[in-house]
Structures are given as C-alpha cells and as structure tokens.
Amino acid sequence: MSRSTAEVIGILLAAGAPRRLMLRAPWPIHQALKEMAEQAATCGMDHLLPDGLVFAPDPDVGLAAVGVGVGLHELAINGVLCFAGETWEARLQVRPEALRPYLKLLMKLDPMEAAFMHQVAETWIARSRIAEKNWVSVRESLARIRKSATQRRQAAVGATR
C-alpha cells in the first residue's frame, strides 16, 4: 500500500510522536525517518515508508527526508497541525482531535507494524527532547554572555570616569 509523507507523519503523530514541533529545530523528524528507513529495510517493513522516500544533504538537518516540509504543510492545511508561538517559541502544535483519521490508519495495521510505528514515534520524541534541551542551553548561554558583556562595559565606563 502506498503512503504519502503526510500520511506517514500523521500515523507517527497518532502513534505518540511529539505534540509540538519546534520550527527552530527541524532535524528530529528527518533523523527519525532515516532510522525508520534503515530499520524497515532490515525487518521487511518497507511498505510502511512514504512513497519515494529519499534523503538529500541539507545544511540545517544533515540528511533531510525530501518531502517532509510538504507533508507538514499538508497536515497544517488539513488542521492536524497549527502554528503557535513566535520567535524562539515558534512551533507546529498537534491538534489531537484532528488525529482521528490517522489513528484509524494506525489501528488497521498489523500489530507488529503498529509496534514498529510506535518505536519510530518514540525515536522522534527522544530526538525532539534532545533538540529542545540543546536550544534551551544555547538561550541560557547567550543570556549569560550578554549579561557578562554588559557588566564589563559598565565597569569599563565606570573606570574611565
């Protein structure tokens, strides 16, 4: 059975993937799909992959799954994802009530296939938490650097008076 990228992402969201996708850190979904493709090839689950899934070098995510952006936009257009937050907090937020069609698709899968999709969703969650932690650390570090630089400038101005 052929599946679009949006459909596979929707099934992963129904299987428990992250409920918010930070726009500043898009790599977790690409990494999860890459691992999904690798594991699917070894355990005969290739039919669960999006049609024509290919990876291309990308400066933001390393190896990007081609079509993920289009799939996410399709889910946003269909009301599964909505935009929330601004600047550092900009994200796509999952609307759980809109996941029903994808939950039905997940429930139609063989138990081994559903477990496989759940495992990929868990990988995506783990990668998203790492990305989130890294961005929080960067923001805190930048705040300390700015505060330190301001204090040094104030001390230099005070010393010259």
Image: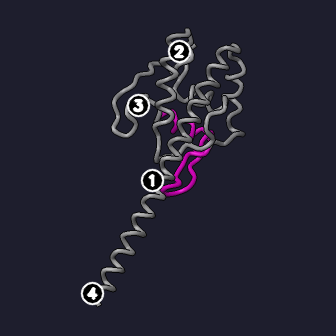
Residue at numbered disc 3: 64
Judged from the image, the secondary structure of the residue bearing numbered disc 3 is strand
Is 92 situated above or below 146? above
Q: Residue at x 67, y 19 (%)?
A: 114
Which numbered disc flags the more N-terminal residue, 1 or 2? 2
| Marks 3,2: beta carbons within 8 A | no
Residues in magenta?
70-93
The answer for how far apart the CA atoms under marks 1 and 2 are is 35 Å
Is 109 situated above or below 135? above
**Residue 12 image position (x, y, % from top left):** 61, 29
Quadrant containing the C terminus is bottom left
Residue at numbered disc 2: 40
**Residue 32 image position (x, y, % from top left):** 51, 29
Which numbered disc flags the more N-terminal residue, 3 or 1? 3
Give residue 138's mark.
1
Give residue 160's mark.
4
Quadrant containing the N terminus is top right
Q: Amino acid at mark 4?
A: Thr
Q: Amino acid at mark 2?
A: Ala
Dot 1: within a 10 Å radius of its alpha carbon, few (fewer than 14), some, or many (20 or more) residues?
few
Which numbered disc flags the more N-terminal residue, 4 or 3? 3
Which numbered disc flags the more N-terminal residue, 4 or 1? 1
Q: Given this view, does label 4 or label 3 mark the residue nearer the observer?
A: 4
Rendered image quadrant of residue 116? top right
Residue reaching furthest bottom?
161
Is 2 situated above or below 149? above
